[in-house]
Image: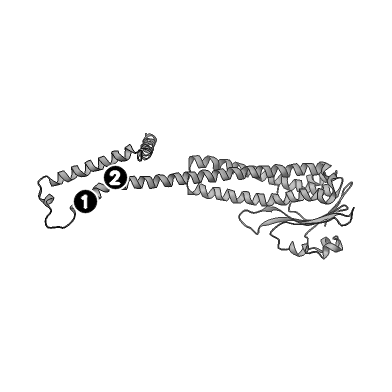
Amino acid sequence: MPKYTFKHAVWQEEESEEERGFMDLLPENILSHSWLNESKEMTVNILHADTAKRGKEAIWGSLIYRQNPDDKNDLRTLHFFLSTDILLTNKLDYDEDEDMDKKKILQQMDEAETPLELLMILLGAMTGSLLHKIDGFEERLRNLLWKIREQNNKQTLAEIENIRHEILLWKNIILGFVEMKLVMPETFGRNVTDGPEYYRTAARIDRISMLIDAYEDEVNNMVDMENVVANYRGNEIMKTLTVLTTLFTPVMAFGALWGMNFEHMPELTWTFGYLISLIIIIVSTAILYYYLKSKGWTGDILQSIKKESSIKNSQRE
């Protein structure tokens, strides 16, 4: 597989971490390491560092840089070994991601001072791809924000949950990049932070982390808004049902009273019994209604009903 020799650094790109060529380039201590077995069916990031011998520091591991939100097994991984002499990686799928232009990556690598900068350039390309995808995610988030105001229903809540799941996936992916940013000076010394490629990629990682945290706050606010609306609607429904049940109590009470089958019920023989019963029911219902209104227990319900009816009438016109 390709071996790229630049002015000051070397990048060896192998087809797979399981290929013979990949393993032949690894030091003996790593060949016996558990990383090779762990990376075969990995579901989380793997990162190891060796600082036992000064000047021979190295890091190796596997980094998940892309995850399909609809399939947990559909992910893309960078397997790598980095020392002061060489960068060794598996082959990345550049054709699948238009934001990772290999020609531009190689052109940028030609100015790299160390193999560490080669890896930072690769990570920078990956984070650049993430930023582009986040831009599309931001547009969806904005549309959902207005949808909550204009059309709030079960489908909107389901979309919020999908967005929240995607944000968690973004956070899970970017954590691996944050760890890579931190392990560089920890392993190779703080002087690596002075390099332009390290600074550029580290700043991009920080920017993505900031955006994801901001989006997470927005989604949490959406969920809080949904909860407030749901609680308000639930309270309004219960309040409406309670008021309506209370208003119809006289009808049900007198109906039950006069519906009894006793032999001696003088009201049944009255000439104006039916009219008197209607008057009693209407008067008692009116008294009950004005009592509830005086307590302020019906105001919001009636106002909302009037407002909804006026809106419907205006739409018809």
Q: In this view, does 195 lie above or below 162?
A: above
Q: Nearer the viewer, residue 109 or 279?
A: 279
Residue at the spot 18% in from the left edge and 56% down from the top edge: 260
Tag shown at residue 255: 1
Q: In this view, does 295 lie above or below 9?
A: above
Query: Which mark sits nearer the N-terminus, 1 or 2?
Result: 2
Q: What residue type is labelled 1?
A: Gly
**Image position, residue 46 (x, y; %):** 74, 57
Residue at the spot 73% in from the left edge and 42% down from the top edge: 204
Q: Crowding at label 1, few (<14), some or many (≥20) Cα neighbours within 10 Å? A: few
The CA span between labels 1 and 2 is 14 Å
Q: Nearer the viewer, residue 223 or 256?
A: 256
**Image position, residue 185 (x, y; %):** 82, 48
Residue at the spot 38% in from the left edge and 34% down from the top edge: 314
**Is 293 left, or right, of 113 in this rendering?**
left
Image quadrant of residue 199?
top right
**Image position, residue 219 (x, y; %):** 58, 45
Residue at the spot 80% in from the left edge and 44% down from the top edge: 198
Q: What residue type is labelled 2?
A: Leu
Tag shown at residue 247: 2
Tag shown at residue 60: none
